[in-house]
Image (spheres, rainbow, N blue to C red):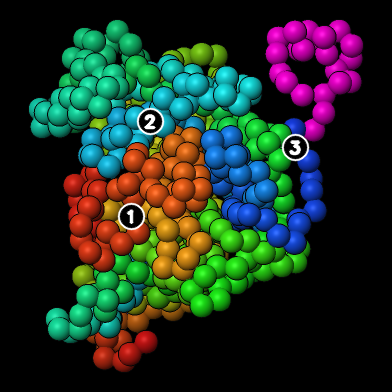
Amino acid sequence: MKFSGLRVLKEGLTGNRGWTPHWRDPEPKAEYDAVIIGGGGHGLATAYYLASNHGMTNIAVLEKGYIGSGNIGRNTTIVRANYFLPGNSEFYSHSLKLWEGLEQDLNYNVMHSRRGLINLFHSDGQRDAFVRRGNAMLNQGDDAVLLDREGVRKYLPYLDFDNLRFPVYGGLLHPRGGSARHDAVAWGYARGADQRGVDLVQNCEVTGIDIERGVVKGVQTTRGAIRARKVAIVTAGRSGQVAAMAGMRLPIESHVLQAFVTEGLKPVIDHVVSFGMGHFYISQSDKGGLVFGGDLDFYASYAQRGNLPMAEHVMEAGMTLMPMIGKAKVLRSWGGIMDMTPDGSPIIDRTDTEGLFIDCGWCYGGFKAVPASGVALAHLMATGQSHEIAAGFRLDRFRTGRGIIDEEGTGSQHNLH
Amino acid sequence: MRLTCPLCGERDRREFYYQGDAVSLNRPSPEAGVDAWDDYVHLRDNPAGETRDMWQHEGGCGAWIVVTRNTVTHEVLGTALAGPAAGARI
């Protein structure tokens, strides 16, 4: 079933009786050419691009819950390409280009909105850093505009510009940055993969990875054994547990990151805005809720909820920057489990086991990476070669010390990002 | 989350700095080799369940504390001073 304006009109006039489920609910087969563990954004995108770019259609995505039940449905939906370091820069730049063609490609409305992203700065030193970052973005071929204080006022008149402690000096505008509807991204990729023959197997938890003499043979699941010559671990916060089934320890600690949403309001915040002097970023969903978040709670956690100190910090930072939001009522808060690497950058690589691949370590930035991560992992699985946009995301970079991608410049140890 | 400092008693989580997994109790020798140091600095068991990690009571007495807690429920199961614990291999 193809979506189109005509179709919407026809269904609207005929009682909406022609819509069909977006994907099948198949029984797992005994054998596939490739199996992807994890039916989140990255896993679904990988399956989609394996099928569409590489013609591999005899593959399955194994999801222990339901499609979209993990971090792809629990994030703050920001899409941007404002990275600085080689390794990250070209990857996220490519991802943003894929976002811009995604809806046509998937024939699915993911509500991608290039509303512009503004990172505020509050000191001379921070301005210098953002000038440098903006130049790096321009050199990469993306867009960046340095706004002075009055320039910011034109876009964001509601900020507390004269805050005594953190006055607004200006901002770096990334016009092509924005947001997308997170669930729709999962559904769009799932539907696209399914249409190309990929089996999306839900309620199917992987309980073991079969390895013989260093070669992967398949997986054990709660719905039976499945043989496969290629297996990819794409399980975000749970990467450690799944990798342990293959005898691996990963350079990853799982942490909780909280997010918040208010009641629906009339349009008031037109961009994605981040505070430069505290952990706070915000945008408004199409439904009207103010969606905002902050930093990690900063302790290892698998609870999909956080504690009060970070909630309090985020609210305080929000009130410092834009006091107008003080009367909005917070409806919900939740936490997602972040797979944190020592240098804050991800991993897309093969492992020491032949045929076993891993895509993890997205820290708190995995959503915008979904398209490019799918393309890169699919390329690696299909051709055996790293995709040029993800060549730096090596698993061994911590052990060797070569090619560390420390975007924040804080070091390459756990709990620094 | 509240943590019990063995010296000061039960305090708010905000008084504590979190260092990470309690691997630092078993620091390898300088000559232990690349793999041992990679294990120590980078690789983690990252358990979903009971774990031991290092916290410092930086907003209080400054003591380093080994906290045993559950990463799924956030339940704190026990705390001990790091000094005596460092001698005993875990």
Q: Is residue A234 visible?
A: yes
The kind of residue tagged 1 is: Arg
| Up/down of A194 relative to A272, above or below | below
User: What residue is disc 3 on?
Assistant: A23
User: What residue is disc 2 on?
Assistant: A94
Nearer-the-camera pick, A407 or A22: A22
User: What residue is disc 1 on?
Assistant: A394
Nearer-the-camera pick, A98 or A313: A98
Magenta stretch containing residue A296, yes or no?
no
| Up/down of A223 relative to A77, above or below | below
Chain of the residue under the numbered disc 1 shown in the image: A
To which quarter of the image does residue B86 belong?
bottom left
Both labels 2 and 1 in a single chain: yes
| Up/down of A15 relative to A211, above or below | above
Label count reads 3
Q: Which residue occupies 61% across, 26% down?
A: A106
Q: Residues within 10 Å of mark 1 (few under 14, many from 20)?
A: many
Q: How crowded is mark 3: few (under 14 residues within 10 Å), some or many (20 or more)?
A: some
Q: Distance between the residues labelled 2 and 1?
A: 18 Å
Q: Which residue occupies 46% across, 48% down?
A: A383
Instruction: Name the quarter where the N terminus of chain A is drawn.
Output: top right
Q: What stretch is highlighted in magenta?
A: A1-21
The percent position of residue A180, horizontal first and vertical second, equals 52, 26
The percent position of residue A415, horizontal first and vertical second, equals 30, 58
Going from the N terminus, do you reach mark 3 or mark 1 first?
3
